[in-house]
Amino acid sequence: MTTRTTVVPARAPWSAVVHAGEQLTVTDLGGNQAVDFLVYDAHDTAVRYSAPDTLQAQGGIFLTTGSVLLSNEHTPLMTVVEDTCGRHDTIGGACSKESNTLRYGHHTWSQHACVENFLAEGARYGLGKRDLVGNVNWYMNVPVEPDGTLGIVDGISAPGLRVVLRAETDVIVLVSNCPQINNPCNGFDPTPVEMTISGGRA
């Protein structure tokens, strides 16, 4: 069995091919760090993560142990097999320069954002802006208020908490270790995370 571990710096992108049966562990090293996440079928990237399919199938809006990340073809891409945090968001989306300026003012335009990270990493696999879809936000706390509005509030993670996913087919995983500093999703202080792929062939 082989194990590959990478520490992804604060604000940085990361990607990898995770083969069927391998496990990907996302560890929040500093605590309260949002990790934006997209997943595609490695053999046909037109088949990619679908938040609507995933939420409809599981009957709830938060991801945790047992959640199956379904594709737009309603096929399983990855399954959450362990979660020491408790719940994760998949409706809040990824920050971008455009959304930052709309929410926080034009002075934020020059700030790096998750969409730019996704585009930079996705280009390695021939993916472009039209291939970006609604994403998972590991560790991000996005409660839904009684009136239906979404909040982005202090995270519920802590140093060393992890989420472990098993690949159900060969997948491409794109990660943006979120650089957002204008809302509490990262405690206003982005920190590194650790990505570990295990269970592969020796």
Image: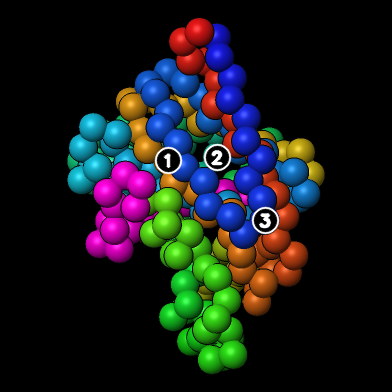
Magenta span covers which residues?
A: 123-141
Q: Which residue is mark 3?
A: 10
Q: Circle 2 is placed at which residue position?
A: 64
**In magenta segment, residue 132:** yes
Mark found first going from the N terminus, 1 or 2: 2
In the picture, the disc for residue 173 is: 1
| Camera-nearest label, 2 or 3 | 3
- Marks 1 and 2 sit apart, C-alpha to C-alpha, by 18 Å
The answer to whether the residue labelled 1 contacts the one labelled 3, judged by CB atoms less than 8 Å apart, is: no
Q: Earlier in the sequence, mark 1 or mark 3?
A: 3
User: In this view of the protein, which residue sits in the foreground, 19 or 93?
Assistant: 19
Q: Residue 86 occupies which quadrant of the picture? A: top right
Q: What is the basis of the colouring in this image?
A: rainbow
Which residue does the image show at 55% across and 9% down from the upper left? 1
Residue 168's place in the image compared with 118, above or below, is above
> Residue placed farthest to the bottom in the image?
106
Q: Residue at x 65, y 76 (%)?
A: 182
Q: What amino acid does circle 2 point to?
A: Thr
Q: Image quadrant of residue 198?
A: top right
| Circle 2: element type | loop
Residue 81 showing in the rendered view? no
- Secondary structure under the numbered disc 1 in the rendered image: strand
The amino acid at mark 3 is: Ala
